[in-house]
Image (cartoon, grey):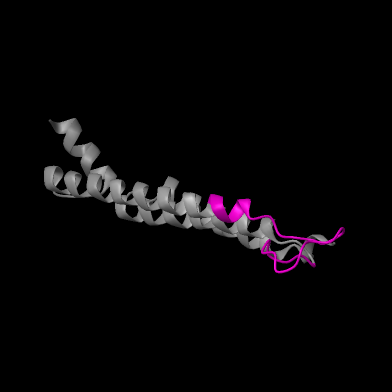
Amino acid sequence: MTILGLYNYWIYAFVLVVGLYAVLVKGNYVKRLIGLGIFQGAVFLLYISMDKVEGGTGPIFVTPPQPGDLFANPLPQVLILTAIVVGIAVTALGLAITIRIKEEYGTIEESEIRDMDRQA
């Protein structure tokens, strides 16, 4: 397999970098939460990419499995379901904190909040 044949990992790396950029560089807290969601989506893509088995089928048995049968691993799918639930909880908590910051400071821009804290 050539390095260009692993296009799903290239997409994963690009989406991961976009999400990480948004989390680290953006000053708006909502944009950071969106970047965190993009970052999580990249991790989901990585797990789903690792699940694929060339020539494999789902681990659902209609007939008894024969020696040499290939099956896809269901564990990454279970981990993705758990990660989605945790990601939703983290996003909800982040939005709740952002709303509280907006109520307290009147803005969700980090630079403006730091300036207000320095003046106080």
Q: Most prominent secondary structure in the magenta stretch?
A: loop
Q: Quadrant of the C terminus?
A: top left
Image height check: is 11 above or below 89?
A: below
Let me know if residue 107 is in the magenta part.
no
Q: Could you say where residue 50 lies in the image, as x and y percent from the top left?
A: 68, 55
Q: Which residues are magenta?
A: 55-79
Which residue is painted at 55% across and 59% down in the image?
Answer: 15
Q: Is residue 16 visible?
A: no
Which residue is painted at 63% across and 62% down in the image?
Answer: 11
Q: Quadrant of residue 51?
A: bottom right
Q: Could you say where residue 89 lies in the image, as x and y percent from the top left?
A: 35, 48
Q: Could you say where residue 105 lies in the image, as x and y percent from the top left?
A: 14, 44
Q: Is residue 83 visible?
A: yes
Let me know if residue 65 is in the magenta part.
yes
Q: Nearer the viewer, residue 75 or 116?
A: 75
Instruction: Classify residue 84 as left or right of residue 47.
Output: left
